[in-house]
Each structure stands twice: as C-alpha cells, then as structure tokens.
Amino acid sequence: MDAPGNLREDRLREIVDQCLRLALPEALPLPAEDEDWIASGALDSMAHVDVLLCIEKAAGLTNVFNRVEAHLPRSRRSVFHTLRAASSEQKQSVESQRLETEHRGSASVGISGWGIALGSVRVKAAALEREYSLAPGTLEQRAGIESVARVKVQEDEITLAHRAVKAALDQSGVDAGDVDWIVASSETFLGYPSLGSLLHSRLLARDTCGVLDIGGACVGLLHCLAVARSLVVAGMASRVLIVTGDVHSRPLAAGRVPGEFGGLFGDGASAFVLGSVDEAERTPPYRLGEFQFGCAGTFAAALAVGTGASGEVTLKFEGEALARAAVGRLERIIADLELRSGVPRAQVSSFATHQPNPRLVELLARQAEVPLEKFPVVAKTCGNLGSSTCGVALSMALAEHGGKSADQRGPIFLAAVGPGMLWGGGILY
Amino acid sequence: MKKLLITDITRMVQGFCVIGLERQGQSFCSVRPLPPWGNAWTGFPYQRGDILQFLLSSIPTVSPHVEDHPSSGVLGKAGQVSEADLVGYLHKAETSENLRGLFKCVVNENTKGSGVYVEPDTALRSVCGCEVLNVRFQLFSEAVRVTLLLPSGEILRDLPVVDRDWNEYIARVLQKITGANRLHRVNRFLNLVMAEYLLNDANPFARIGLTRLHNEKHWLMLDSLFPLPRMAWFDQLS
C-alpha cells in the first residue's frame, strides 16, 4: 500500500471515481469530468460531504476538504485537483521531514506537552501498614514510603489517563483530532477494549488515528517513547500521543497479596505529546535521543505476578534479590547511556528512572554517585506507579527544566527495569 | 389546542423542522408540529424554550416519525422557560445512554462513506436525547459535522449538524475569523474553545433525530446541542 503523499495521479483519479461510485445510485453512470454533482442532481449536499470524507480516508490524507475556502469542489476534475494538491503538499512535507531526520539523526522528535494524574486519595504509610497487617515501620522505615496515591471509587486507569492526556494536549496546544497515533501502556489494565482504544473513544480522536497498546510493565513508557519516535521518523505520524495508566490498589489490595509487596504501589498516569521539533525555537522542547533495551533473564524468577485457576493473584516476590538486581541494572543503564552519548552523568539535569521504592532510589543515587535531588520524588509520596513511575518522573523533570534555554539545561536520562528482567534506557537532549 | 415547549429547531432544505415537548403526567413526549402544508416551516420566528400553542390533528403517522402531527400553524406564544429548565424537561422525555436505545433499533455505520443510519421500518421513534461526554466538530465550507461520545462509550461519528442556532453561530464565527488557513483555524476554535465551554457545562445534552427516508435509509443527525452557543464565547476569538 502506498504511503499518503506517494499516490500516483491515476490512483488518485481512481479513488475519486470509486468513492463517488459508492454514493451514486447503481443505475446512474459516473458524471462527466466537469459535471457539478449537486446541480445535476447526482448527489445532495449531505452525500457530497460523505463522498469527500470517503475520498480523504481512501487517500490516507487528513484535513483536505475542510481547508477549502469558498465552495467545496463538486466535480470529478475539481475534486481530483484538490486531492492532487493536498497529496503533493503531504509528499513535500514527508520528504522534508525525512531529509531533516537524515540530517539530524533521530534527534528531531521532541516532547511538546506532558501531563500527569495521580489517584486523588493519599494514604499515609502508617495506615497502609495497618491495612496490610504489617509491623509498624515496615513501609515507612524500611522502604522509605511516606504515602501512596490511590484512586477514589469513581476513578480508574481511563479517568486518570484521560486527565493526564488533557493536560498534555493543553500544554502542547495540540487538538486531539490532530493526533496520528495513540501509544499506550499499563501494567494493571487487562480488559478489552484496551486502554488505548478506550482513550481513543474518550478523546474522539480521528477514526484514522491508530492505537497501539504496548507491554513491558515498568519499562512500558520507554517502549512507548521508542515506538513513537520511530513512527514520527518513518513519516508515519506527525503527532503521537503517549499515555500510561496504572491502578494497583485494586488488584494488589490487602488480602490478595502480602503487604510487603502490595503496600509499595500507588495509582497514577502520565501522558506526552511527541512530534517533529523546530530547532530554530529559542527554547526547543526536549528531543528524544538514543534508546537501548534488553532482557536479563537471569533474574526472571525474582518477581512473577499472575492469576491462579480460581482468579486469585499469584505472586512470587524475592524482595532482596530483586532489589539488588534492579539497582545494579539501573546503574549499568546509566553508565551505558553515558558511554553512548558522551554526556558525563554530572552534566545530566535529571534522572527520570523507575523507582521500585524510595530506599532503592537512594541506593542508586549513592552507587551511581549522583545527587539524590536529581531524581524527581515519585515513589516516596505516591508509591511505585508501575509503567507510570517513569512517566511521572519524566513529567516532573520536564516541568523543572523544559522551560530553560538549551544552554542552561542538561540532558535527561531515562532508565527502567521491569519483571523479566526487562530493562531500557534513553536520553532526552 | 395544545401547548408545546419548543426544544428543537432544525434546518431542512426547504425551511425548518420544529419539535416540542408535550407534558404527559410526570414525563414528557416529543411532538413534531407540521405546518399546514408540507413537512417544513418556511419561517419560524421563535426560539427554543418558547411555549407555543398549536391546534394539532391526529392523522396517523408513518413510522419512525411517529411524533408528526399536522397543525394549523402557531396560534400564539404562551410563555417561555430558561435553557436550564428546558434541558431538565428533555431529560424527562425520550432519552438513551447507548446507541441501541436511541431509536430502539440497531444503528449502523455507513460502510460506503461517513455517517450513521437505521434501516427503514426498524426505528420506533425519530428523535431521542442523550448526555454527551465529548464532542468534536468538523467544519466544511458549507456543512458542519459533529462526532459525539455517549455515556455508554459508543461514538456517533460524522453526524450532520442541522441545529439552527449552532449553524447560525458557526456562520458568525466564519465571518469573524479572516486571513490565511481560515477554515483550519475555525475548526481549531470549535474544538479547542467551544467544545471546552460545552463540556464544562453542568449538563451537555444532545438531541439526535432521524431524517426522512433518504437513499433508502434514515440517517442520524444532530437536532440540538445544549448548551446553546453563547455570544460571550466570541471573546476567545481575539
């Protein structure tokens, strides 16, 4: 199938005729090239708009006819000319984007908007310990958790994600109708339709806006960023909406899993708008740089969450082993990013990493020899938010540094690990 | 003589179609007073919320337009209610939270183009109200389409907007916005500003109607969208 903008003229003519044919009564021949469809009585005004929408979709082009000033084209020839002009415009745009990408590598995709949403209820560590029948201090002293964010009855992954998306779209000034892809991740939303498709409906995105739900648990956001970047670089999308949403408080409720595990988690969501970056801007948005991913199967057995035959949550959680492995891997990702990018960690503005619990963040900062202040505070006050931990941390980092000029800010390092043990890292410049 | 609370005034090719509510005990039902000749009123100098008096005949009607009642014209205005009250009454008339309940039949997507329709002889009524969770406008130079999200999570895509007030308002927006990429900017204004006002209202509500038989189908259209557009929203244009 040809990409939009690459359609040959004869194919464009075929599309016009085929879509027109669909709307005409069977007995009626195709109107002549210059025959006015409405004046001749072949179509009424409602069917006319239907045909134009049909043509837009078939050609894979958007906003073709709703930009036409004066009267909409009403003949095969005038519709073809409008379509050809739009196709040519699209082709030039894709080509210039491709050349720009070739010239600058992958650094021309940036984040123009971001948003977060946390569960509305804050539950203090002491209350959590009582709820999970844990010894006093188990969560507060040992794990360093002060509170976790939890959803109210009316909230869920969709409502949180929707709030985060609205904030991201507002900040970027992008309308939901202009989004080409929604790329979503959640480690708790297991139903169908998927999180991405439900958000698509909630936002009334275009019906030609694609939806992609991606796994990876705590690494989910990094997977989304890498995929979204590829969609833009490949010319398949101009704007991509990334969203994560996780509500742990329901599947990991007291009585279903041990408190040492369930008590660490909170509920939250994050969203980002990605698109091509105009480097001429005085304060250019953070751009996506290199990403790397892998899977260290050695530690796969340290954490396993599943569902038993009777629907109960099954959990295998070797906390000590997992903590050691997670911190070691996160530190290694930071070192690899440093090597690959040539940016010393001291110059990094912020480390938007996964945060299994606050003590491990402190340990990571100590081992990596970077100031703890460079890690946005997420797990300490909100709990481990799963795929949204990295998202919320990244949003906080962008809020702090995104408004600064390029010479007054350093890169942001992303690093995450998840069950498997999956791992991923990335850099924002 | 019957009093009808006017709820919908929509554009038809030849004029206007009008629907009102008639009280039936604690609830309300929709009545479509037809002019003495034809289906469309050539002029209708009244507003939604007006309470008008009609002399209605009870000639049998053709499904799904069971609300049709030929009249002898408007006999007078008996009063008017606020928009908030009007929407409150509409909640007590025909409503549905999902596609299937709108006209008590299966609703189909047009596989040959855009829009949504019901097959002939399947719908039990031709107008129904629903709450609106989200709205998106798509403006062409001569037509406005709208996509709505229902409480059930189902979407009504590409409905023609026949609401008289919204059409007139959008025509004014078009006059007000000038310069390059005008239609694109109007579309953005509709979806970023007006849709926001609309959805921030306590009670966004739509009335969906069915066309007469057209290409062998009854097509869904947006008869009314509340809150009605406000002149104050123009301030955002600057």
Image (tube, coloured by chain):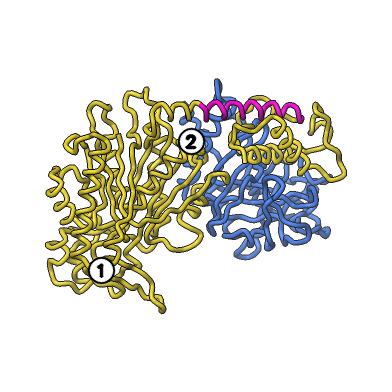
Chain colours: A yellow, B blue
* Image position, residue A356 (x, y; %): 24, 57
Q: Chain of mark 1?
A: A
* Image position, residue B18 (x, y; %): 71, 46
Instruction: Give the numbered dot on residue B147.
Output: none
* Image position, residue A148 (x, y; %): 24, 59
Q: Which residue is mark 1?
A: A317
Horizontal side of A410 relative to B3 (left or right) equals: left
Whether A292 is drawn above or below A173: the answer is below
Q: Which quadrant is the N terminus of chain A positioned in? A: top right
* Image position, residue B199 (x, y; %): 48, 46
The residue type indicated by label 2 comes to Ser
At 29% from the left and 57% from the top, the residue drawn is A296
Horizontal side of B106 relative to B226 (left or right) equals: right
Counting residues from the start of the chain, the first of labels 2 and 1 encountered is 2
Q: In this picture, which residue range is highlighted in magenta?
A: A75-95
The residue type indicated by label 1 comes to Phe
Q: Which residue is mark 2?
A: A238
Magenta span: chief secondary structure: helix
Horizontal side of A124 relative to B59 (left or right) equals: left
